[in-house]
Image (cartoon, rainbow, N blue to C red):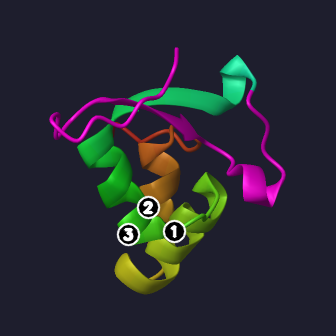
C-alpha cells in the first residue's frame, strides 16, 4: 500500500507503526496497522511516539490511579471470579 497525502481528501488510509521506527520498530506486517488518517493524527497528538506498553503504563499511573487489576482483567491476564 502506498501512502499518499491528498489535500482534497480529509481522510485517507495511513500506515501506523505499532512500535515507532524511531523507537526501534520496523516496517514488517506484524508492526504495521492501516488506519484512517484522522485517527492516526489524533493518536499521535495524544501519544506522540510512545510504545503500546508505555501508553498502558501511563494510563494506569495517571488516569486509572493504579487500578492494575482492572487493566489485567481487560487484557484477559486475570480471570474474573464468578462467585
Quadrant including the C terminus: top left
Q: Secondary structure at mark 3?
A: helix
Q: Which residue is mark 2?
A: 44
Q: In this rendering, is residue 3 above or below 57? A: above
Q: Give the spatial CA distance, label 1 vs label 2.
A: 4 Å
> Which residue ends up furthest to the front in the rendered image?
7
> Which residue ends up furthest to the top in the rendered image?
1
The quadrant holding residue 11 is top left
Q: Position of residue 75 (x, y in %)?
A: 50, 42
Residue at 50% from the left image edge and 39% from the top image edge? 79
Q: Position of residue 44 (x, y in %)?
A: 43, 61
Q: Main secondary structure of the magenta part?
A: loop
Q: Secondary structure at mark 1?
A: loop
Mark 2 and mark 3 in contact (Cβ < 8 Å)? Answer: yes
> Which segment is the magenta one?
1-27
Q: Which residue is mark 1?
A: 48
Residue at 25% from the left image edge and 46% from the top image edge? 38
Q: Position of residue 17 (x, y in %)?
A: 61, 41
Q: Which residue is mark 3?
A: 46
Of the pair 55 and 73, the residue shown nearer to us: 55
Amino acid at each position: 500500500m502506498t501512502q499518499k497525502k491528498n489535500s482534497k481528501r480529509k481522510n485517507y488510509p495511513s500506515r501506523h507503526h505499532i512500535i515507532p521506527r524511531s523507537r526501534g520498530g520496523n516496517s514488517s506486517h506484524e508492526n504495521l496497522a492501516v488506519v484512517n488518517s484522522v485517527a492516526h493524527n489524533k493518536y499521535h497528538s495524544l501519544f506522540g511516539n510512545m510504545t503500546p506498553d508505555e501508553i498502558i503504563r501511563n494510563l494506569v499511573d495517571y488516569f486509572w490511579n493504579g487500578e492494575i487489576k482492572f487493566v489485567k482483567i481487560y487484557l484477559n491476564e486475570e480471570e474474573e471470579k464468578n462467585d
